Amino acid sequence: MLAKQINLPVSKSLLNRTLITIAGQGNLKSWLENNANIVANGCRDTQLLINALTQENTGESPTYYFQDAGTPCRLFTAFAAANFTSPCQITGNESLNSRSIEPLVTALIAMGADIRYSDQVGFTPISINRGITAWQDVTISAALSSQYASALLLIAPLFVGIKRIIITDNTHSEAYLEMTVQLLNRLDIETSSVKEGTALCITINGDYQSSNTPIDLDLIESDWSSAAFFYPLLLGMSKNLTIELLGLKMSDSERNKDLSLGGSQIKSSQGDAAMRELGNLLGIETIETENGILISRQNSLINPTPECLANDEILEHDQTLRINLKNNPDLVPALVVGWCILGKSAIISGIYNLRFKECDRILALQENIKGLGCTLAMLGSEEEDQWILNCSGRFFPTQLQIDTQSDHRIAMAFSALKPWVASLSYTDTACVEKSFPQFWEQLKKCTFD
């Protein structure tokens, strides 16, 4: 088979967390100098975090601007409060400033920081006027995002002794918390976790200054979240073509965390490595290669004229796919577009938090799949968090404009329609710079222009 080789960015989730730990060890400047190749393969979000962590302290109150970068903003806010040197301001663009930071700020204030909202309560811009002088055990909600808890986990080793964090409402994106815990463990910082009712209590024993363990560069692998967009793209390529996604790992022998789907097991430092199993639901097989992974079409039966069914009929059908994606929200856009291409309806749960990303991703999916004759509708209440993807009326128009809402994952997901829609355009293509600056260049390798 002919293989198209794709160069992926490094995982921004891994790299951003790693940068915080290296800054905590006090080795960031030299690490950046010695690993310029890794930094160069990063994305805009990562560069924004590096800029903040390396900004010179002039003695005045600096302002750190994070554009729409939610993860860097949240991780840096906690770090700035725990490693306080002077008052500072933290802000972003309209998109970032409309995403809540309240759970993290409330937790940091409870730990002794003086943080004020500059405009709307619960949202950036904020000012940090006093930092945390000693660790205080704290409770934080992960209902909106697991990143708040990850931010606290990453600053805990800045303090000596035993630290405890109680995480409530931990129902989404647990794989990202596991990633953060694993990173600390690699630095020989001990962690343990116990369930306390519906909450999770994580204990951290160890500190950055006592940890002389260097960062394992093998940890900083390519990004599975970015790789996911090539799975639905493969559905429109010739059957004898394959795609090799470079720099990905299928397993990590140091991690014994098994994520299961239909009895299969995944071991990976990235939760979105679940795509290798979820890809089977698109009829795509994933195998390991010397340089990464190879994906190929297996049983991708694309129905040219699906039988048009009502939502109730799809619900009652025994063969309808039912799947919970609460731990892999970044994979949802790619999977939804893939199922639309296949004409495969599904009942999806655990995705409500997509409303609070760079845009309301549920709304963005709903609006854009209309152009394919597909729908995504809520079943029951928000608390039930179930959605029916009805692809039974799917068709491919001759032309379609994708309203990306300036969201990188929406733009990349709908690019998989390129082989199916003769005239495919986007309201914004530059938004991919957030996570995958070379995406359009790599896309051209696979097919088309």
Image (cartoon, rainbow, N blue to C red):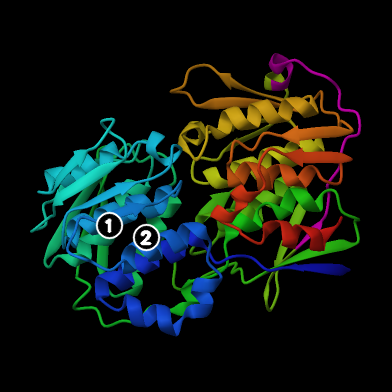
Q: Residue at x 59, y 35 (%)?
A: 405
Q: To which residue does mark 2 refer?
A: 180
* CB atoms of marks 1 and 2 within 8 Å: yes
In the rendered structure, the answer to whether residue 92 lies left or right of residue 270 reads left
Q: Quadrant of the C terminus?
A: bottom right
SS majority, magenta: loop
Q: Percent x, y for residue 385?
A: 50, 26
Q: Quadrant of residue 6?
A: bottom right
Q: To which residue does mark 1 refer?
A: 153
* Residue 112, numbered label: none
**Magenta residue check for 36:** no
Q: Residue at x 14, y 65 (%)?
A: 159
Kindly tell me whether residue 88 is visible in this rendering. yes
In space, the residues marked 1 and 2 are separated at their CA atoms by 7 Å
**Which sits earlier in the primary sequence, circle 1 or circle 2?**
1
Within 10 Å of the Cα at label 1, are there few (<14), some (14-19), or many (20+) other Cα atoms?
A: many
State which region is magenta.
Answer: 295-314
